[in-house]
Amino acid sequence: MRSVFVKALYDQRRSLLGWGIGLTLLVLLESALWPSIGNMPDLQAFLANYPEAMRELFNLEDFGTGTGFLNAELFSAMVPVLFLTYAIGRGARAIAGEEESGTLDVLLVTRVTTAGLLVEQAAALLAGLLALGTVLYAAILAGSALFGLEVGVLPPLSATLATVLLAFEFGCLALAVGAITGRRAVAIGVASAAAVAAYLLYVAGELVTSVESWQPLSPFTQAMSGGPIGAGFQVAYLAMPAVAVVLVAAAMPLFARRDIAVAH
Amino acid sequence: MQTAIQTWQLSKSYHGRPALQAMDLAVPADVVFGYLGPNGAGKTTTIRLLTGLLRPNGGRATVGGHDVVRDRERAQRLIGYLPGDFFGYPQLTAAAYLDYLGHLRGGPDRARIRALADRLDLDLSVRIGAMSHGTRQKVGIVQAFMNSPALLVLDEPTAGLDPLVQREFLTLVREARQDGQTVFLSSHNLYEVEAVADEVGILVRGSLAVVEAVDKLKAQAVRRLDLTFAGPPPVDVLHRVAAARQIAVSGNTVHLVVEGHTTELLSATAPYGIEQIVTHEPDLEDIFLSYYDTRK
């Protein structure tokens, strides 16, 4: 291991394997349900019975297509939650976790700078998420081919990218808060609360007209609106990595100026 | 590097409680500097300030001429650091950990790592998580020494080491000085400091009580003597000697403590026929305690 980046990737290898397998099973399982759902003769009538709010939120109008089905089943909750959990956990551990376990002391008294550490950890987080994203994309393609969902090749790619960027943004928030406070629990708490708030804003924007104008501020809106499968590559996607970069950059001077705590 | 470490009014407090107060210190290059003090005196605080892990509340410090705040990265490159509580990555073997750190310091010297490990009897193939405290400490020592840094900053380095390894460690420290490295070593183990240090600083309650060459400190020190007389000891005469204290008589032998020179004592008692003098080598413990007492 020649750098913090390589070591951070090495540290992720086992969890990436586990999460990758879980993600694959989830996607294949959901896809396997499609033939029985898609062939339901009175599906549309069944869906019409759902409350209007739910139909809007989960795009149930499109539930009769493979794309709509995966959007509702995977991307409305499960997949973003899995990616966010992974990213927030990694981000919080990257610096605050090292500090709490006492290994940060020796690490910083090398050529590694506080700013460099933040950048390398953010890069390793993104690399890990891209690896998970690759698994997700492959699983969707495989599921679609096996069970006839006909989602195409490019649409799930943009959806995967949106999910990766969404998780990266909140992972970077956890990384930044961890670097600023040195406390893993605080980093996880703040990033999770922010993710829940962003999700609520997205949901409220779908359902309440007065909130609608605020909705684009939510990373969930940026990532998930109009799909995400089938929405195509959105300009709004760029907001997520941009905010991530701002968060990491904002943490740099604060991390550089604070005391490093002794292990506890 | 003329002056390895210099501080000007260096101060640190935690939540308003002072841990280090206006410390002025200059450690010349190529010496072993022993930094002594009881637990809680501020030794670790000083060391974490010097290594750039803490920010001072007042004053400043340089390492190799580089300010530890404004020029922290340059200062840190000069330092081989062993924290008071050393932790490595539990899932890595010692070899993988040391290799990793070596890369972060400009490239691992694997032959040097192996040689150090052999001397400390450290098995590099064991995972750090499976190591005892003492073995883990050996990994910490190897990582501090392995890149032959200009300045070694070692916080309580011998904690948890068995006596044989301690001796080997002290040899490493002496070799480092011979090779032109500076060693800043904190301890409350006075014997190990006495054995290797050229200079000693004694820290009491966040203030530097004294900085002195070890030889000089010993010369100023209180000395324990046993005088055996041919007949009954001249106790009255002994009590009149200004430097003599803690006089205790058992038979023809007097046990006492002399502060500074023994000339007056010996010339005053010589007429009474001294058969034997036993001098106990002064150690830093006495010096240290006397400084500590005066501060109380």
Image (spheres, coloured by chain):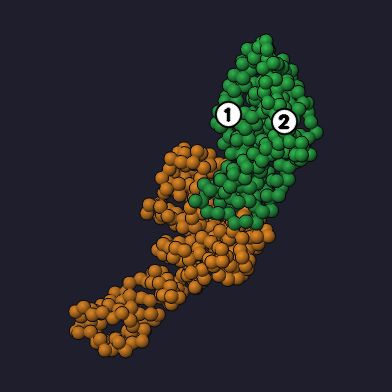
Chain colours: A green, B orange
Q: Residue at x 70, y 29 (%)?
A: A53
Tell us which disc is closer to us: 2 or 1.
2
Instruction: Name the element at disc 2.
Output: helix
Estimate the x, y position of residue A28 in percent, counting from the top left.
61, 19
How far apart are the alpha carbons under marks 2 and 1? 21 Å
For label 2, count other residues whose C-alpha is less than 10 Å away and answer few (under 14), some (14-19) or many (20+): many
Estimate the x, y position of residue A59 in percent, counting from the top left.
72, 25
| Circle nearer the N terminus (2, 1) | 1
Where residue A19 is drawn, which disc sits there?
A: 1
Q: Mark 1 — on which chain does it sit?
A: A
Q: Nearer the viewer, residue A92 or B66?
A: A92
The amino acid on which the numbered mark 1 sits, given as a three-letter code, is Trp
The residue where tag 2 is placed is: A224
The amino acid on which the numbered mark 2 sits, given as a three-letter code, is Met
Is residue B143 toward the left or the right of residue A141 in the image?
Answer: left
Instruction: Name the element at disc 1.
Output: helix
Q: Is residue B220 above or below residue B73?
A: below
Estimate the x, y position of residue B246 in percent, counting from the top left.
31, 79
Q: Residue at x 68, y 26 (%)?
A: A51
Q: Which of the image's four quarters has the N terminus of chain A?
A: top right
Q: From where the camera sits, is residue B180 visible?
A: no
